[in-house]
Structures are given as C-alpha cells and as structure tokens.
Amino acid sequence: MLPFLIILILLPIAILYACYMKVIQSKNMMLEALSGIDVQLKKRYDLIPNILTIAKRFMEHETELFDKITALRTNAMKSKVGSKEKFQAEASLETELKALMVNVENYPTLKSDATMVQAMTTYNEVEEHIAASRRFYNSALTQLRNSVQIFPGTLFAHLAGDISSYSYFETDKQSREKIDASKYL
C-alpha cells in the first residue's frame, strides 16, 4: 500500500515538473531562434556597406537608392529585436536590396567585377540563412505558445513572460510582390 501512495503523490509532481520544463525549454528555444535571426541580420548589416561601396564606383547616379538602403539599414539596426517594427524594417530593407541587385544587372562592368560577384554571392547566402533562421524562429514561437496555452502548461505561462510581445515573422505585402525591374532601368 505504501508504494502505491508514494506513486500517487510523486506522479502529479513529476507531471507538473515535466510541464514546467517544457515551458522553460520552449522559451529558451524561441530566444535562441531570435538570436539566430539577429546573428544573420548582423552579417547582412556588415555586408551592405561593402556592396554599396563597390556599386557606387560604377553607379554614380544611383545615390538615391544608396541613401535609402543606408537609412533602412540604420532603422532596422535600431529596431527592437522580435518586434513587428523590426520585421517590417527588415522587409523594407530586403526589398530595396533586391532592387539594388536588379539594378546591378544594368551595369555589365559591375556585374562582371569579381568583387561584386563575390559580394552578391555572399549576399544570397546570407539571405538564405536569414530565411532559415526566420522559419526556425516561427517554429520555436509556435512551440512556446502551444506549451503555455495547453493545460497544464497554462499553470506555468507566467514563467515564459509576455509572449504576446513576440510576433511571428511575416512578410509584408510589398515583399510578396515581384520586383518591377523596369522602374530601376
């Protein structure tokens, strides 16, 4: 009878502890995923000045585009990590960088310049890493939200903090549209 009573007492404690661990693990995974996005964005931020410097040598009259990209980069760097504003700033920056890459096509000398080719290749790799990081973040955020919204995880939801302040990464309408290369020609 005593072993049965011990099991009867320890089983609910073990279940609650497992739920507590799941909430904490989910929160940490989401924060890790958010940090992964930030690392990839830092790579992009570091790459942008190099791309602009190389392109400026060949594209003297495109200063408006360069200035816009620089301003968007600054705005994106200043935005709070994980906020909708950060994601919107990143989407705008991504759109303008794609426009720059389309514009590069109009300059055969620039397009064939080895340094620019390497910078564009690196940029494409960084964009792929950012996309993968965003997918991982969205997945981790879903897991965290599930762990605190499904009972008995709701008992430990306060341990995750205010998860409503974290938003999913979603592309804006402008980013979903195809780039019209004719307006950059």
Image (cartoon, rainbow, N blue to C red):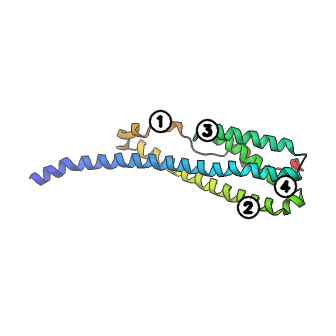
Residue under the point 69% across and 50% down: 46
Mark 4: which amino acid? Val
Q: Nearer the viewer, residue 15 or 85?
A: 85
Question: Which tag, 3 or 4, sits closer to the chain's start?
Answer: 3
What's under tag 2, amino acid-wise? Thr
Whether tag 1 and tag 2 are in contact, CB under 8 A, the answer is no
Depth check: give the residue in front, 18 or 97: 97
The residue tagged with tag 2: helix, strand or loop?
helix
- Kindly state the secondary structure of the residue where label 1 is placed: loop
* Mark positioned earlier in the residue sequence (1 or 4): 4
Residue 48 visible to the viewer: yes
Neighbourhood count class around disc 3 (C-alpha, 10 Å): few under 14, some 14–19, many 20 upward: some
Q: Earlier in the sequence, mark 1 or mark 2?
A: 2
Quarter of the rendering containing residue 172: top right
Q: Mark 4: few, some, or many residues within 10 Å (few <14, many ≥20)? A: many
Residue under label 1: 162
Residue at mark 4: 104
- Is residue 177 visible in the rendered image? The answer is no
Q: Secondary structure at mark 4?
A: helix
- Looking at the rendered image, the disc whose residue lies closer to the viewer, 1 or 2, is 2
On the picture, is 24 further left or further right than 97?
A: left
Question: Which residue is identified by label 3?
Answer: 84
Q: Residue 121 — which label?
A: 2
- Residue 93 rendering spot, x and y as whole percentages: 72, 45
Could you tell which of marks 4 and 2 lies nearer the N-terminus? Answer: 4
Marks 3/1 in contact by CB < 8 Å: the verdict is no
Measured Cα–Cα span from mark 3 to mark 2: 29 Å
Q: Nearer the viewer, residue 61 or 4?
A: 61
